[in-house]
Image: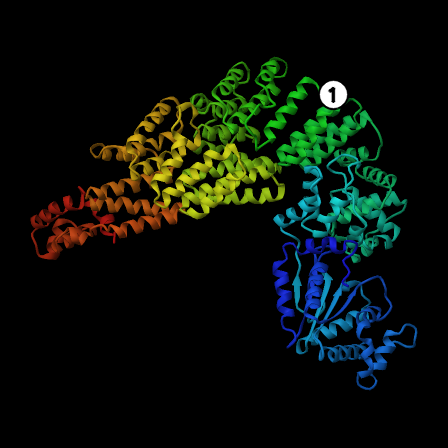
Amino acid sequence: MVRTGRLGRRVYEAGLLGRDEQLRVLQELMGRLPDAGGAMTLQGGPGVGKSALLRAAAERARRAGWQRLEVAGRSDDTPFSGLRELLRPVLGTADALPAGQGGILRSALEIGSGPVPETSKVALAAFNLITTRAAEQPVVLIADDVQWLDMPTRDVLAFMARRASDNPIVVLVALRRGRNMPGVPVLDVPVLDEPSARRLLARHAATLPPAVRERILGEALGNPLALVELPAAWRPTRPPGSWSPLPVSSALTTAFAGGLGELPVQARDALLVAAVDHVGDLSEILAAASVLAGRAVAVDVLDSAVAASLIRLDRTTLRFLHPVVRFAVLEAETPARRQAAHAAMAQVLAEHPDRRTWHRAQSVNGPDDEMADGLADAHASLLRRHGVVAAIWALERSAQLTADSATRGHRLLCAAEHAYGLGRTRLTHSLIDEAERQELSDADRAKAAWLQDISDADPQPGPARTRVRNITELSAGDPNLALDLLLSAALRAHRTGADPARRAGIVAAAERLTGTSDPRHIAALALAEPVLRGRAVADRLPSNEKVWYLPDADGLRLFGMAAHAIGDPVRAVDLLSRAETILREQGRLGLLSETLLTEAADLLLLGDWPRAAHLTEEARRILAETRQPSLVAALTSTDAVAAALRGQVERAVELADTVAAWQRTDLIPTLRLARGVARLGEGRYTEAYDELRPLLDQPHEGLRWQSFAAVMPFAMAADRGSSRHEAADILAVLEEAARVTPAPLLHVQLPYARAVLAADAAAEELYMVALGQDLARWPLVKARTEHAYGQWLRRHRQAARSRTMLLSARTAFELIGASDWAGRNAAQAADNPLVSVTELLSPQETLIARLAADGLSNREIAARLHLSHRTVAAHLYRAFPKLGITSRGELAPLLKLP
């Protein structure tokens, strides 16, 4: 049987998860039997599923009735020991071999029976033995962990693999990545992708806390063996701390760090020091290892660790090949040795006081307030120099060393706040839960509620943890926390569609607070009452000139959030793009992904679709790394809107249905917008109208940015779907809202809606008003308005003007990226083609118009055509009304049209 370590059949199916392509290749290879054969090397890291694939191949051979010969590598350097195990089932037929070959084979496989024959002769004899057997029954040779087989056996396997194709023989071998078998095709066995990894983990870690599951998912790096064994090895009695190493099983140790126990003592000292430190600086590691060993440790002591595939070295750094190797190194040592390694590291970090404090804190037991205070003070420096994760670890460890329960809880909440900014929602909630088990002050209890609310991106309607009463009570004693609570309450009200009374209570609490220029205060007003407080918010947002001088990412992000909420996508994009840059530099991926998605939504509405696509792809990569399921829904809803705008109807509806299944109350308006625009794109106007109407048919104070974004498609659907009368009543509500709020997203679209829904007598003037706006930052609005006006002109037989307007709209749609829109417009034109210039004008008028368009004067045209200049003027006088123009300057663009 193929060896699969300690896992056996537990991970047989697990190892095949997501392996369709590899299985297909193996099946094609084995499908050559019995007419021909071949060979394949399965290459990959430890635990990726090579053994499972070999087991699948062995099972197919068994069902087909083929001869299976199997061997697995082990620590035995005896020459031909592996070959002996492989050939044992067929050695009884060795007498049938040609003269002398049977004796060579027996001599090679019998231990201590004399001198070892030459490997080439043994290989030939072994191959002849296999081909003799294959003449009667196809043979499948399977060798697992070939890197651990003795060298002569590996040479024999390579000899047979290179010659298998002309015989009914299949040779399958599995090797660690970085090893090879010359001349044999390689099939790479990669780690699992994230969806497959999550499915596998769900089967083996269903009872573990969510934060632990996310930690395992991140540390396993898609490795099937790690995804199965790390949950089994996890122990809830482990010391708390997100930095703590995960416990490993013997199966993992064998697979990832099998050569650890055979390393020299100094090499193990160096690996231990590297395992307790996360920087990987080679000079620091060697210096600390020298302190730990009590004598100088040189870099060459690590050669054995490199050879054992435990680490990778370059000139300045040391890296473990997989996180499990680091865990195995730590698991193999006693707590005292781990503490000694931390102390040694602290001793050599005199020039890095923040890291020195961290390692000193790890080298002590029990409460130590002096050490805890020093580590809490160092967390800000760690944040600047080593990122958010280092700051979280420092605060967690500081809390562990703190004797006072209230102080311990406060430090845990500080760590939770950093975890939220990083996008680690599970860790955030875990830290909040631990903090709430302490004796928190009233202010910290309020802060815990605030953190819980803002980190819950999937809130359900119901009472919030953050009470408006808490905001009022804290307004005098802790105004900074009161502003945090105000923002939390407003954010939840915005996400859950809170009732007017709740929103009014938040606004009243805001008015009692000082610091009205604080971004949190402004964002809270925008989120709670985007229409009623829209003007006040707009007046307090920073001007465009000041945006690039604001260094605070949080302030910029909140100002951008406020602009987005009140329906000002231009200012939102300007603010969020600046915040995005700073957040990216700071590594605050959680807030960055949220900022990118908000900015992308606004860019879609404006018409900068290439930039929006770039931001959503970056957000997708971040979410794959940080694993924020709640924001995945927001990303998918943004994708749905983008697909709908592009005219990709089936994709838009599919994405919207996917999000709807998650029952996210806060995303319902966005899904309505996506579905409505999608239905409009496929000409189902009544369905589009019914989908969009709930966004607009409500009191004006209940309108949101999605309502404003729906104005143009709603008006189009009403016009095309015979709902103009009802739509006019809804338009009156929008007009009322426009008198209250300055929201540009509403104001730039209302003129379009007025024109589309107006009587013919007033429509043209309204279209001119709509196009007379400053639409430099609104290419999508301009293109839609030009398109609607061009259609109106065509219906009213102003063919030439219609042609100009529709061509401009089509060009704009193509520049935006709305190729499907442009295609539909062309199709509409084909169904109802415009009259060409030559059909509108007589041949003489056409010729004169073309010459005038080329810039010739009346006298020059007259000389060329042998006419009087008065005759030329008369022809042009008659042509201009036919073309719908008033001057010769309008001829050139018109006559270039097809």
Residue located 51% across and 27% down the image = 494
Residue located 69% across and 53% down the image = 14
Measured as percent of width and height from the top left, residue 653 is found at 45, 44
Q: Nearer the viewer, residue 761 or 814?
A: 761
Residue located 72% across and 53% down the image = 11
Measured as percent of width and height from the top left, residue 718 is found at 32, 36
Residue 775 seen anywhere in this rendered image of the structure: no
Q: Quick check: 537 above or below 17?
A: above
Q: Which residue is mark 1?
A: 439
Q: Quick check: 5 above or below 747?
A: below
Q: Secondary structure at mark 1?
A: loop
Left or right? Give the position of 118 relative to 417: right
Measured as percent of width and height from the top left, residue 186 is found at 66, 65
Left or right? Give the position of 865 relative to 186: left
Left or right? Give the position of 102 relative to 809: right
Residue 338 seen anywhere in this rendered image of the structure: yes
Outermost residue toward the bottom in this view: 99
